[in-house]
Image (cartoon, rainbow, N blue to C red):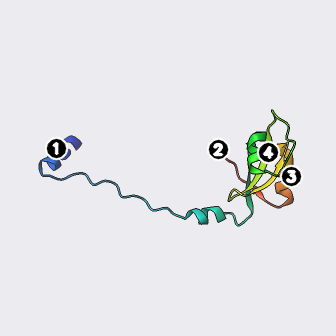
C-alpha cells in the first residue's frame, strides 16, 4: 500500500517532506555548566597525553596509565597514578563521578 501511495504522490508532483532539523535542547555552554560544579569524570591517559594537558608536570615515567580527574566542563582538576586516588580526590571535593562510555 505504501508503494501505491508513493507512486500516486510522484504522479501528482508531490514529494515526501524532509524531516525538519531538531534544535538543540541546550547550548554548549549550558551543557558545560550541567552539574553545577558538583559532577566530575575520570579519564585514563598516557604520560604523553598528560604532558599535553598538564605541561608543568615533569618526570612522568613512560609506559604507565595515569588517571585525570576532570570537572564536567572538561577542566582538569587532578592527575594521579591510580584510579582510587582520583576517586578519593573527587570524594574529598564532594564531587559526584559520572560514568563515561
SS type, badge 1: helix
| Residue designated by label 2 | 101
Dot 2 alpha-carbon crowd within 10 angstroms: few under 14, some 14 to 19, many 20 or more: few
Of all residues, the one furthest to the top in this rendering is 63
First in residue order: circle 4 vs circle 1: 1
Under circle 3, the secondary element is: helix
Image position of 33 with respect to 58: above or below: below
Is label 3 in contact with label 2 (beta carbons under 8 Å)? no
Residue 62: which quarter of the image? Answer: top right
Query: Mark 2 or 1, which is nearer the eye?
Result: 2
Residue sitting at x 73%, y 43%: 49
Residue matched to label 4: 67
Whole-angstrom CA distance, mark 4 to mark 1, is 59 Å
- Give percent across and percent down for residue 63: 80, 32
Work out whether mark 2 precedes mark 1 in sequence or the reverse, and give the earlier one.
1
| Of callouts 3 and 2, the N-terminal one | 3
Mark 4 or 1: the one toward you: 4
Which residue in the structure is indicated by mark 3? 88
- The residue at which mark 1 appears reads as 7
CA separation in Å, label 3 and label 4: 12 Å
Amino acid at each position: 500500500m505504501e508503494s501505491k501511495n508513493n507512486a500516486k504522490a510522484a504522479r501528482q508532483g508531490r514529494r515526501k517532506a524532509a524531516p525538519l532539523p531538531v534544535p538543540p535542547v541546550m547550548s554548549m555552554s549550558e551543557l558545560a555548566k550541567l552539574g553545577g560544579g558538583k559532577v566530575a569524570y575520570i579519564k585514563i591517559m598516557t604520560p604523553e597525553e598528560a604532558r599535553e594537558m598538564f605541561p608543568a608536570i615533569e618526570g612522568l615515567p613512560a609506559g604507565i596509565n595515569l588517571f585525570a580527574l576532570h570537572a564536567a566542563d572538561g577542566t582538569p582538576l587532578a592527575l594521579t597514578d591510580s584510579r582510587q586516588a582520583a576517586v578519593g580526590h573527587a570524594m574529598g571535593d564532594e564531587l559526584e563521578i559520572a560514568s563515561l562510555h
